[in-house]
């Protein structure tokens, strides 16, 4: 983000929004924000970040999905006993 944001305040604002949504698994919202709400100072790095998020979109594990996996593995372990 340092190479994309125009200044430090903008960087903090963008990171706060993006990380909040990415932690919730809202990659599409984060991508739309990146594409339409950020005026990047380095277009190459901006494009790389968008490409990276698009590529890993299906691989991101949300907190709720992780919790569900933990529950399922606990149930599976309980059944084996």
Image (cartoon, helix red, strand yellow):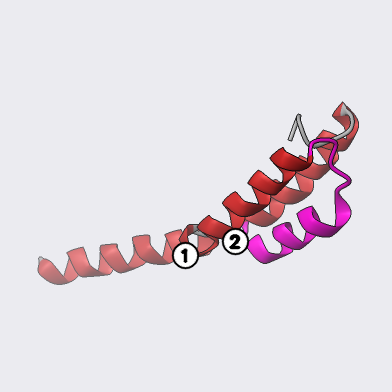
Residue nearest the viewer, comparing 27 with 3: 3
Residue 5 among magenta residues: no
The answer to whether the residues at label 2 and label 1 have Cβ atoms under 8 Å apart is yes
* Residue projecting furthest to the bottom: 79
Q: Which residues are magenta?
A: 24-42
- Secondary element at image label 2: loop
Quadrant in which residue 7 is drawn: top right
Using residue 66 as the reference point, say whether residue 74 is left or right of it. left
Image location of residue 10, percent across then percent down:
88, 36
Q: Residue at x 21, y 69 (%)?
A: 76
- Secondary element at image label 1: helix
Residue 33, relative to residue 49: is it above or below?
below
**Badge 1, how many Cα within 10 Å: few under 14, some, many 20+?**
few
| Quadrant in which the N terminus appears | top right
> What number is the disc on residue 65?
1
| Quadrant in which the C terminus appears | bottom left
Q: Give the CA separation, mark 2 to mark 1.
A: 9 Å
Image location of residue 56, percent across then percent down:
51, 56
Using residue 6 as the reference point, say whether residue 76 is left or right of it. left
Image location of residue 52, percent across then percent down:
58, 50
Q: Which residue is mark 2?
A: 25
Residue nearest the viewer, comparing 76 with 14: 14
Q: Earlier in the sequence, mark 2 or mark 1?
A: 2
Using residue 46 as the reference point, say whether residue 79 is left or right of it. left
């Amino acid at each position: 983000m340092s190479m994309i944001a125009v200044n430090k305040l903008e960087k903090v604002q963008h990171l706060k929004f993006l990380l909040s949504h990415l932690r919730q698994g809202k990659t599409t919202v984060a991508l739309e924000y990146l594409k339409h709400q950020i005026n990047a100072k380095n277009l190459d790095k901006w494009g790389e970040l968008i490409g990276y998020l698009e590529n890993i979109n299906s691989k991101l594990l949300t907190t709720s999905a992780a919790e569900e996996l933990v529950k399922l593995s606990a149930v599976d372990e309980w059944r084996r006993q």
